[in-house]
Amino acid sequence: MEQKKCPNDYWGNPATNSCELCSGDKIYAKEDHSGCVSTKKECGDGNSVLDGYQCEKCKFLASESHDSCVNDEESCGEGYKGNSQLKQCYKCSPYFASRDHFSCVYEPSGCGNGIYVDLKAMQCKSCYPKIASPDHLKCFDNPASCGIGYFGDIPLSQCRACSPLYADVSHTKCVSSYKCGLGNMENSFDFQCEKISCNKECKYCWGKFETECMLCNPPKLLFVEKSILESSAFMKSYENFLYRQDDDTYGEFRKSISSSTEIKCGICPSNGYFIDKERQLCIQCPNNCSKCATPFFCQTCVQNYYLINENTCFPKTPVNLTVIPTQSPLIYRIFFSEV
């Protein structure tokens, strides 16, 4: 007899050429009525027991428990994936079901950008409109929660590492060196921009020590060495920062400062220093000069020194010193004679 003509719950016994009711420890009739099985799962992939004790082929997918049919992979349920070829839902545990339920993933990061793992359900889920944590185990409301060295990629709804760049202080983007913004500096160990806690004398600084100032709180002035003033890159970047004081000029000025440079703030002495009010600088006069018109031209020497050439203070000696100008105003002949 033809097994397919047997009614539900029956199988076709070729020996007796009759349909017999599945019973005993095998109560479910196979989908093709060729025999009986003990459990619904033994109905096989793509089959479920929908009514009574008959295994039936599902049009789309059979549930993992084989007691229903579902219309798409998502309907397999949390923690389950759907195999469209085998028409069967499968449990992913101890792994996680992907957000679309098409596959199982072996670790939370495999869920993808903007997705976190619900560990209770073993299911990848969307964080949108929030942001998925770096470990994909939770969602954050604010990019700042992403943590040190990470920024919140809003289009992807994902916290992402900035290395080898730096996460800005708001954790909304990655920036390169000297681009952390006004008042901030790179932490090269954590790849994070951090606000600098300046010395109390400094308005802006490139480090926390008193010799790492960039601008001063009035009425203090910036003490700089004359050798630094000879660097056109330093002076140009300093003046740009002084007049604009924005993110770009701050970064450029920091870039021009050598790690060995010492710049500090203080009250500028009237004796032996030149006060540049316009540029807020305090610069030492030439050596042994008590008063100077510029950092390089002396007007008055300290006691026991003579002024030569407007920029050199020559010490008095146990001899008479006679200075006779030559035809060139910049060259002098010096004569010594014993007392």
Image: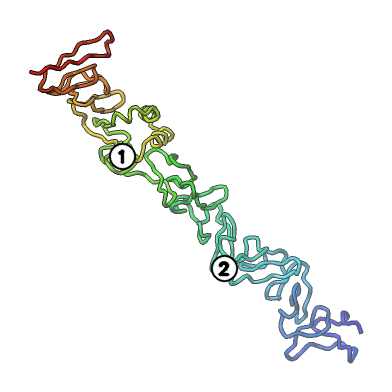
Q: Is residue 312 left or right of residue 90?
A: left
Task: Mark 2 and mark 1 in contact? Answer it, CB < 8 Å.
Answer: no
Q: Is residue 337 left or right of residue 73?
A: left
Disc 1 residue type?
Glu
At x 26% / y 14%, what residue is drawn?
A: 331
- Residue 21 occupies quadrant: bottom right
Numbered label attached to residue 212: 1
Q: How far is disc 2 from disc 1 in space, using C-alphas? A: 54 Å
Q: Residue furthest left?
A: 339
- Residue 230 occupies quadrant: top left
Disc 2 residue type?
Ala
Q: Mark 2, mark 1: which one is toward the viewer?
A: 1
Q: Is residue 31 left or right of residue 153?
A: right
Q: At numbered mark 2, what does the secondary structure look like: helix, strand or loop?
A: loop
Towards the viewer: 334 or 99: 334
Numbered label attached to residue 55: none
Towards the viewer: 175 or 286: 286
Residue 253, image x, y percentages: 39, 34
Residue 313, image x, y percentages: 19, 22
Q: Residue furthest front?
A: 338
Badge 2 local density, few (<14 within 10 Å), some, or many (20+)?
some
Q: At numbered mark 1, what does the secondary structure look like: helix, strand or loop?
A: loop
Residue assigned mark 2: 121
